[in-house]
Amino acid sequence: MTEWTFDRDSIRSFRFVDAGMDLATGEVWLDYAFDDSPPLRERLRIPGAPFVLDPQRMSAARRALRVLHLIAGVSYYKAAAPLQMEIGGLGLSPALHALLDSVYQHGLGEFAHRNGLSMRARAQFPSPKSAPTPAPSLGLPSTALVAIGGGKDSLVSIETLRKAGVAQTVTWIGSSQLIAACAERTGLPTLRIERQLAPALFELNRRGAYNGHIPVTAINSAILALAAILSGHAAVVFSNERSASYGSLIAGTGEVNHQWSKGWDFERQFAGLLRAEVAADLDYYSLLRPLSELAVARRFAAIDAYDAHFSSCNRNFHLLGERPAERWCGVCPKCHFVFLALAPFMSKPRLVGIFGRNLLDDSSQMPGFDALIEYGDHKPFECVGEGKESRAALAELSRRPVWQEDAIVARFANEIAPQLDAAVLAIQPLLIPEGEHGIPARLWERVRADFGA
């Protein structure tokens, strides 16, 4: 980028330059630019090539690639967050326009909050045109690409689908050795998709680009949708529970949802777009959508095959490819929440053995747990459950002698619980499946009893 100088505040437009794929190698490329800058090229590689597609499936793959190109641009757009979006070529359907507006507005909500920006004044896509011809059914095999992240949620989905007799391929993006170890532990077929961000993006960061959280699940969902078309799978399955639809309540700002693209609003829009405009028989859903985080934790506690392999600590996933020696840092919001969520459903020795320490008996970590229960602070910008779930978990532990003397539990019982309505601290109502979901009816009938519905 030697002939073009990046000046964040003078950039007028973000351009979706080009996207392509090589069926012989599985290589995919996505090109973007600011104003007249050289292109920023992202690369992916989907295993299984060469791909031989009939004309209908080739057309669906091209449509899926376009959706991916437009969604994945959020990683680069945020560097300057200009007003104008130039998409070139075909216009946007009303459904695709609405989805992109949501991804760039709500998916960048935390980014905007931290950078003092208003996304409503930015990321203006061209007005939509008429809807395209409805997508045909492709006759895809009734197998699922199931996203695995190395944590408890995706492992619960994998084991639930296994019990329901659904053929699945465990899939992840990137080079995390921790995720690879969990995937291998399942004993199922695996698919690792390579993703390389444009190297020039890191140079822009050094030159003063805006930075912050992006809707990674939206990007990963679009990648897996393309992979499903290429490799022949009829479903893309994620493991986002109903708690993901609720954000952090910020004084003077309102709700900001760190995990917006894990929520029901994104799932509903993205699933509808795929069926309408990519392939009518391509399902996209979260198997855990009707469950709370606590209900997921209860189901995970009934499985012990992954105790020595799983980790939900996001600090580990900041490492590029390494398999960390310690799977839990013990001080981040994810560690706090997962420990607390599992505690009502696991024996204390087993849980402490997994984490290597008792996080609920460390008084120095009280501020972190206060944020989880929204006591004097807002819910952390992390993928953690609702405040009412954390409060109910602590209330439940405060009634159990084995936990009562631990510092965090004792302080909750003595100082915080008396200020709360005891009627809203019950844990059992939070374990009942409820709410909207996109699980196909034929599968829901097989798993609903397991979920307690």
Image: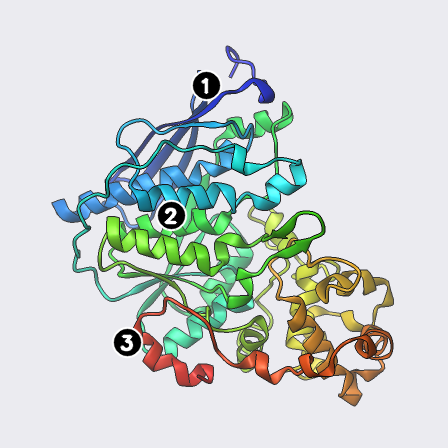
Q: Is residue 371 above or below residue 128?
A: below
Label drawn at residue 35: 1
Between 387 and 53, the one nearer to me in the picture = 387
Between 425 and 360, the one nearer to me in the picture = 425
Tag 3 residue: 442
Tag 2 residue: 223
Where residue 362 appears, as percent x and y from the top left, is: 84, 68
- Specify the quadrant that holds the C terminus: bottom left
Residue at the spot x=49%, y=63% of the render? Answer: 240
Local SS, label 3: helix
Where residue 112 appears, as percent x and y from the top left, is: 60, 39
Local SS, label 2: helix
Q: State which mark lies toward you, 3 or 2.
A: 3
Which of marks 1 and 2 precedes in the sequence?
1
Label drawn at residue 267: none
Where residue 56 appears, as percent x and y from the top left, is: 14, 47
Local SS, label 1: loop
Q: State which mark lies toward you, 2 or 1.
A: 1
Where residue 427 appears, as percent x and y from the top left, is: 64, 82
Is residue 299 shown to the viewer in this render? Answer: yes
Residue at the spot x=31%, y=43% of the render? Answer: 94
The residue type indicated by label 2 comes to Ile
Residue at the spot x=24%, y=41% of the render? Answer: 62
Is residue 358 shown to the viewer in this render? Answer: no
| C-alpha distance separating marks 3 and 2 | 26 Å
The residue type indicated by label 1 comes to Asp
Q: Is residue 264 above or below residue 78?
A: below
